[in-house]
DNA sequence: GTGCGATGTATCGGTCCGATACATCGCAGC
DNA sequence: GCTGCGATGTATCGGACCGATACATCGCAC
C-alpha cells in the first residue's frame, strides 16, 4: 500500500522523505494517522532497488535565492522512473482483496484521479460489497448474540453498524455519480500511449448541501 | 492489544484458539475484520510463557455424551491464571497513547464492563481529544490546501471529516451518560480485594431511538 | 551566543497479517 | 458403505508497518 502511495505522489513531483511523509499525511489523513519513517525509508530503499524510483540531484529549484551558501546538507530527493510509472499504473488497475480493506481502499481512492473509470467503478463496488458483508455480520451479532454481550460491547457494535450503513450510502452515491457519465478520465495513465502529464480531476460528489 | 483482548476473553471462560478467534471476531467485529492465526497462536505462546495463561485439560464439559470414543484430538484449551487477571487489570487501567488509536480504543471499549468508571471517563475523553485533533487536521487541509488536491481526494477528506464529527458526538453522549451517575462498576476487577466473578454491565447509551 | 523547534535521514525490535500446510470430524449424496 | 467436502482445529513463515530512538543541521527568538 505504501509503495502505491509513494509512486503516486512522486508522479506529481520529486520529493525527499520528509516532504513525502507530509504529503502522504495530507492526502491520506482521512484514512491513517501518519505514516512512520520506520516504514517509509525502507520502502524507499526497496523501490529504488527495484528501479521504480531514483535519487535526483537537489535542483536549485525555481531560481529564487537560496544559493549554495552552505554545503546544502544531505537531502535525498527521489524521482519516479518510467518503469515506476508503469508499475504504478499496474498497481492502480489491479484489484486484489486488500484493495477493499480500509487502508487499501483509502489509498486507491486517493488516486482515483489517475484511475480509469471502469476501475474506479469496480473498486467502489468491491468496497461496497465488503462493507455490506461487515454490516451483515454486525446485524447478526446484534440480533442473535445480543444477550451474550454486555451493554458496552453492544453499543460498540451499534456504532460500527451505523458507520457501515453510512459508508454504504456514501458509496452508492459515488457509484451513481460515476455511472452517470460525468467523471472523465485523464489520458496518459495507461501503460503506454500519450505520455502527457496529467491534471484536471473529475468532480465526484457535488450533491452535498451543507458546507458551513 | 491482542494480549489485552485474549486476557479479557479468557476471563469469561476457558477456550481453545479457534473459539477464541470466533469470540474475538464477534466482540471486535466493529473494529477490525478478523484476527489472524498468525498473530493469535504466537501471542498465546507468549502469554503462556509469561504465566498469564495455562493449558487446561479438555474437560468432559456438561456431562453430555461425546465420550472419548476417539483419541479426542489435540485441542488445546487455555485458561487465565491469577497473575493473568492481575495483568489484565493493570493493562485495562493504564492508558498510553496507543489506547486512543482506532484499534486500541476499540479493544478498551469492548471491555468497559470490566473497567472502573474513572478509567472509562479518562479513556473516552482521551479518545475524544484525539479525534478532535484529527478533525482539525482535516478541516485545515480542506480549508487551506483545497486547491492543491483533486476532487476525489477532497471527497475522501470530507467523508473522513464527517466521520470524525459523528464520532465526537457519539463520545460526548457516552461521556455525559458516564458522568450522570449511571453506569455502576463491577467490583472485584481491581488488583486486590473482592474476587467475585463479575457480570452485570451497565447500560451506556439508551438514548438511541430508532431500532428497526 | 545560545538554546529550541522544525527539518531531515536512518535503524531496530516488535506486532500483526496473509498465505500456506496439515489433520480430523460430521454428514450429505451416491 | 464409502467418498468427498465444508467446518473445525493447530501451527509456521515471510513480510508490512509501527513506535522508539538516535543523530545532525537550520533559522530565529530571546
Image (cartoon, coloured by chain):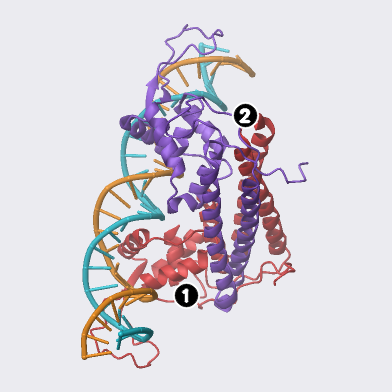
Chain colours: A purple, B red, C cyan, D orange
Q: Is residue A3 visible?
A: no
Dot 2 or dot 1: first in sequence order is: 1
Is residue A73 found left or right of A160 in the rendered image? left
Q: Gap in Å between the C-alphas at discs 2 and 1?
A: 52 Å
Q: Position of residue A187 (x, y in %)?
A: 53, 32
Q: Residues within 10 Å of mark 1 (few under 14, many from 20)?
A: few
Q: Which SS class for mark 1?
A: loop
The residue depicted at 51 percent of the width and 67 percent of the height is: B27
The residue depicted at 60 percent of the width and 69 percent of the height is: A154
Disc marking residue B12:
1
Disc marking residue A78:
none
Q: Position of residue B172 (x, y in %)?
A: 70, 56
In the image shown, does B24 or A208 lie closer to the viewer?
A208
Q: Which SS class for mark 2?
A: helix
For the C terminus of chain A, the quadrant is top right
Please tell me whether mark 2 or mark 1 is closer to you in this view.
Answer: 2
Q: Position of residue B63 (x, y in %)?
A: 37, 92
The chain ID associated with circle 2 is: B
The chain ID associated with circle 1 is: B
Q: Is residue B30 visible?
A: yes
Q: Which residue is mark 2?
A: B148
In the image shown, does B141 or B61 lie closer to the viewer?
B141
Amino acid at each position: 500500500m505504501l509503495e502505491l502511495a509513494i509512486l503516486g505522489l512522486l508522479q506529481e513531483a520529486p520529493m525527499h522523505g520528509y516532504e513525502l511523509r507530509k504529503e502522504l499525511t495530507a492526502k491520506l489523513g482521512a484514512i491513517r494517522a501518519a505514516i512512520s519513517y520506520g516504514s517509509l525509508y525502507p520502502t524507499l530503499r526497496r523501490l529504488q532497488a527495484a528501479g521504480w524510483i531514483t535519487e535526483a540531484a537537489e535542483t536549485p529549484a525555481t531560481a529564487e535565492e537560496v544559493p549554495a551558501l552552505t554545503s546544502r546538507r544531505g537531502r535525498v530527493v527521489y524521482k519516479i522512473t518510467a518503469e515506476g510509472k508503469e508499475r504504478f499504473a499496474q498497481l492502480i488497475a489491479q484489484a486484489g482483496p486488500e484493495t477493499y480493506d480500509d487502508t487499501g481502499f483509502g489509498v486507491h481512492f486517493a488516486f482515483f484521479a489517475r484511475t480509469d473509470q471502469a476501475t474506479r467503478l469496480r473498486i467502489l463496488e468491491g468496497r461496497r460489497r465488503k462493507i455490506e458483508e461487515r454490516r451483515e455480520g454486525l446485524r447478526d451479532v446484534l440480533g442473535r448474540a445480543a444477550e451474550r454481550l454486555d451493554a458496552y460491547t453492544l453499543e460498540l457494535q451499534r456504532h460500527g453498524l451505523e458507520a457501515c450503513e453510512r459508508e454504504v450510502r456514501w458509496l452508492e452515491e459515488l457509484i451513481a455519480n460515476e455511472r452517470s457519465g460525468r467523471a472523465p478520465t485523464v489520458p496518459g495513465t495507461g501503460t503506454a500511449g500519450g505520455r502527457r502529464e496529467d491534471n484536471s480531476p473529475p468532480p465526484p460528489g457535488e450533491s452535498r448541501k451543507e458546507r458551513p
